[in-house]
Image (tube, rainbow, N blue to C red):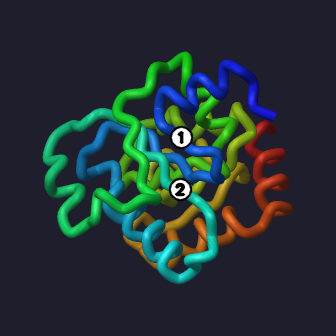
Amino acid sequence: RPTKLTSQIRKRYKVPDEPYLMCLSTIEPRKNLQNTIRAFLAVKAARPDLHAKLLICGKSGWKTDSVFAGIDLDHPDLIFTGFVEDIHLPALYSGAQALCYLSYYEGFGLPVLEAMACRTPVIYANNSSLPEVGGGGGIAVAADDLLGIQEAMTKILMDQELRIDLAKAAKQ
């Protein structure tokens, strides 16, 4: 049951009362938001009965236009929050079905660790430091594997037992 604080935060960032996947990063090419968004929209197209949103948190960085090239940014299942204050992140992580963090390269990947501390599973890229950070608390997939990303998203959204198991592993 959402607390008043969580409700206020959800309202501030326009997060509806529906399941959602979450992305958190500066919007720039290396963060691979393009494949994340394309995979999510493909999941929604394949399963129009699936009630879920993609929450895209972060401010614009460099080459933002190239990140969104060819993507319908007005799609009703995409929610752009802009910058999220650190103090509000735990509420957003805790409400998410999973954090999607499919960067091409990360030095560490702090959002992966933060989400898992909130018992939120992570769909993460199997490169650089992310497998070591994500471990058993999520699903690893190649950053360029659009079908693999779609499959991971579908599993997370459709399989409650899997989410529970990954959430337990994430906390550990």
Q: Amino acid at mark 1?
A: Val
Task: Give the camera-side residue of 94 and 7.
Answer: 7
Of labels 2 and 1, earlier in sequence is: 1
Residue 4 rendering spot, x and y as whole percentages: 71, 20
Q: Name the element at disc 2.
A: strand
How far separated are the C-alphas under marks 2 and 1?
9 Å
Label 1 environment density (alpha carbons within 10 Å; few <14, some 14–19, many ≥20):
many
Task: Indicate left or right for 69 with 152 as reference.
Answer: left
Above-or-below relation of 60 to 97: above
Residue 62 rendering spot, x and y as whole percentages: 16, 40
Task: Give the camera-side residue of 19 and 87.
Answer: 19
Q: Quadrant of residue 93?
A: top right
Residue lying at 42% horizontally and 39% vertically, measured from the top left: 57
Residue lying at 85% horizontally and 62% vertically, measured from the top left: 161
Asked whether the beta carbons under mark 2 and mark 1 sit within 8 Å of each other, the answer is yes
Above-or-below relation of 129 to 154: above
Any part of residue 34 in sight: yes
Above-or-below relation of 115 to 160: above
Label 2 environment density (alpha carbons within 10 Å; few <14, some 14–19, many ≥20):
many
Q: Which quarter of the figure is the C terminus placed in?
A: top right
Above-or-below relation of 145 to 103: below
Task: Indicate left or right for 55 with 26 as reference.
Answer: right
Any part of residue 135 in sight: no
Name the mark on residue 53: 2
- Circle 1 is placed at which residue position? 15
Q: Name the element at disc 1.
A: loop
Residue 105 rendering spot, x and y as whole percentages: 36, 49
Residue lying at 38% horizontally and 43% vertically, measured from the top left: 80
